[in-house]
Amino acid sequence: MASRGPQSLPSGTATFLFTDIEGSTNLVKSLGTERFEQVLGAHARILRDAIAAHDGYEVRTEGDAFFVVFRRPSDAVAAAADAQLAIARETFPHGAVLRVRMGMHTGEATPASADAGSDYVGLDVHRAARVAAAGHGGQILLSETTRSLVQDMVPAGTGLRDLGDHRLKDLTRSERIFQLDIEARPMEFPPLRTLDVPTNLPTQLTSFIGRDREIAEASRLLRDTRLLTLTGPGGTGKTRLSLQVAAESADAFPDGVFFVPLAPVFDPGLVASTIAQVLRVPITGANAPLEQLLELLKQSRMLLILDNFEQVVSAAPQVTELLRGVPGLKVIVSSRAKLRVSGEQEYPVQPLGLPDPNALPGIEAFSQYEAVRLFIERAVAAKPDFKVSNENAPAVAGICARLDGLPLAIELAAARVKVLPPAAMLARLEKGLGLLGGAARDLPARQQTLRGAIAWSHDLLEPGEKRLFERFGVFVGGAALEQIEAVCVPAEDLGADALDGVVSLVDQSLIRQVETGGEPRFFMLETIREFAVERLDASGDAAETRARHADAFTDLAEAASPHLMGSDERRWLDHLEREHANLRAALDWSISVDHAERAMRLVYALWRFWQRRGHLAEARERAGRVLALPHPHEHPLARARALEAAGGIVYWQGDMADARRFYQECADIMRVHGSKADLANALYNLAFPFIVAREKQRPTGIALLMEAQALWREIGDRAGLARALWALGTDAQQNGEYDAAQSYTDETVMLQRELGNPFDLGWALHLQGSVAMQTGRLASARESFEEAMVIFREAADVTGMMLILSDFSELARGEGDRRRAVTLLGAVGALRRSSGAGLQDIVDDVEGRMVARELSADDQPLLAAGHAMSLEDAVRYALASAPVTPGS
């Protein structure tokens, strides 16, 4: 009999049971993964049989750990007893011996979501987990609440033993623990794993959410080092993590675990006396406090948590002296900056795990993300009937993402759920940080608002560091050192060069560093960046800094532009993708201050990137705003190039009327102000709306192409001539002149191979394959399409890959593979919607493609399957000789 699934989890009062195998890591090492899995299967069968026999509900499993809930506490006790007896009787594979610890607590069962198939939140769940964690293999523990409910209903052959009051490692209130004794089973166990050493660790009024991996990693590091520094910006949860790691490690320190809050201390000379005060060590006489501490503690085995060390970081040598003089001492430091002393082990505290707001999992998986669980827990504390539902889950995910997974920020936001539902909260968060005021009054003032938490770190900076911090706020999505040096100058304002300043801010956790392509990249969490921008705006330095930012990224875009269709195109396209947020910011600011010339230069430099990476809808909106700026004729060449960009954008969207309008104005300007190369390019562009439009004006288009071709011959531009040949081949193909089309196409493919322009070669191969397909040479068509797909795939060219996917769809029809043809058509349709590209519709129309015209209602499942494919899945499917499963 299997345990019941999570589709009907109980609410109200329930009993939570947690179990896991003691020493499972050693079992894996001794048995090997494959054998351990066999043992684990037998263990799971035993537990599930016992759970089902007593009406239990399995909430989730993680490795060898089970979380189960029962409506009646007596059922939980009976299930645990039966499971322990069955484990003792079982002959496990490979001679394995299992020792399973179990613990339970009865309390309020609050589902994490409105969907019954979910998880639970609330202090009582964590209480049960901590009761279980206090035990040993073979032991069953009950909280006082559970014991009081079952004391007269325990199974025959069992009894309850009072183990006394214990402070659990969740740092909340102490708990009276009871043991369920089972006849014929061991009843004597080592002391419980609770906080029974001397300690002043502060009691926490809220549960500690998530961080299981971080706790495990930091605890492991603490075992192997004597000085562990947890670093991170304000609001990351360094203090709570340091307390939890200390609680988990308390057994190793018989002389105590002590928390030393240094937030009120600004004089480094007071650190030793503050430690002494916490330890209640009397400091008397003329000797320095540090010397007296060393003398009094030299035989101690103790753990100190030095919290908020950043403002007294110059006292770091005192910590080193303590560690040197007290061999049994270990120290956990929480700080936004490393101490930079010998023997230090840094552990950067990352934000909580987040779901992707654009690709949300189901409700069951959704509540497993740490940031979401924290939000739900705190929201339920503020509004007991709060639940996550399918309707509000996207807003909850958006809130957590908007706040970068910072625990403090999420807690502050969740507290507002009493008056703001998640959707309204998210809308307000988009407007700034002000929503997050009003934390608990008993928190330090610096933690009562998110702004206060960040300001606490900011106020400790040197003046030059503050200016660098504020100026860095203009970068959206981070920056490379080159851009930082260009934007955050002059160095005399900073008191140091940009690199030294950035290193200092990284050390102090206000800026983060990642490696991208072998180069360092620096960024701020968005919540911190908002604060930096506020400070920048208040400084009077904002306009000049933003102007430097716009200039730097205009320079970058213009440096990249010539390479976006060359042999190094992928690297430059990726570079622009990485800097896209900064490029948007530069363009938006240029528009906001009516800097038309720079805005037009940016649009021209970026349009091919926007087209190839599928940002056409955004590109059209931005180009339209730029062309509408006042005084449009003051910079004629810049305007002509912006018009070329706008024409290219709408051309790729399939809007031939606007393409003709933009290209015509561009050509008119180039006839007056441009070079011969400028004019040839403008005429070539203008020819296309006449050639490929549904209502063709072929003579006009051919005349424009011939004029462009003559100019390119005059100036010796072979790349231009190759493009003219391709255009003439396109015209011939669309008019059924296949011999001429083949001749033009073969010549342009040959020229493009010589010139080494992957983009134009990809398009020439598309044309070559299309002509081959239309003349019945399907094997040749496939060869051309496959080569073109490799080119576009290598460049991550979304619109190019979409074009070739359509080619493969029509090719599959010609080969008699209707299933593949319709499925690929569905994939193309999804890409068309996501990228904003509409040129494909015109290509399908003018080339007479038939797949879309032959669709029936029976084809909907195949279209849906194609629509569900990722771009990579669709490309692999097109290139495969047999269908592949989407996502495989």
Image (spheres, helix red, strand yellow):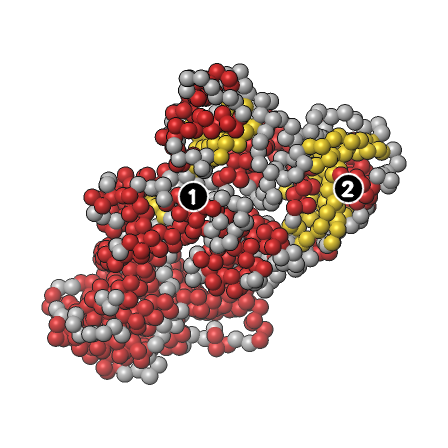
Image-quadrant location for residue 244: top right
- In the rendering, at what x and y percent does residue 91 appear? 77, 31
Question: Among all residues in the image, which is located at the extreme right?
Answer: 156
Q: Is residue 395 left or right of residue 616?
A: right
Amino acid beneath label 2: Thr
Image-quadrant location for residue 346: top left
Q: Is residue 298 left or right of residue 196?
A: left
Are there few (<14), some (14-19), or many (20+) residues within 10 Å of tag 1? many
Query: Is the residue 830 above or below the residue 99 in the image?
Result: below
Residue 146 circle label: 2
Q: For marks 1 and 2, give the CA distance.
A: 41 Å
- In the rendering, at what x and y percent does residue 99 appear? 72, 30
Q: Is residue 725 visible?
A: no
**Viewer-proximal residue, 539 or 861?**
539
Are there few (<14), some (14-19), or many (20+) residues within 10 Å of tag 2? many
Amino acid beneath label 1: Pro
- In the rendering, at what x and y percent does residue 318 appear? 41, 24
Q: Earlier in the sequence, mark 1 or mark 2?
A: 2
**Residue at image coords 41%, 47%:** 454
Query: Is the residue 237 above or below the residue 835 in the image?
Result: above
**Residue at image coords 21%, 77%:** 665
- In the rendering, at what x and y percent does residue 577 appear? 35, 56
**Viewer-proximal residue, 110 or 608?**
110
**Viewer-proximal residue, 334 or 461?**
461
Residue 233 circle label: 1
Number of numbered markers: 2
Image-quadrant location for residue 836: bottom left
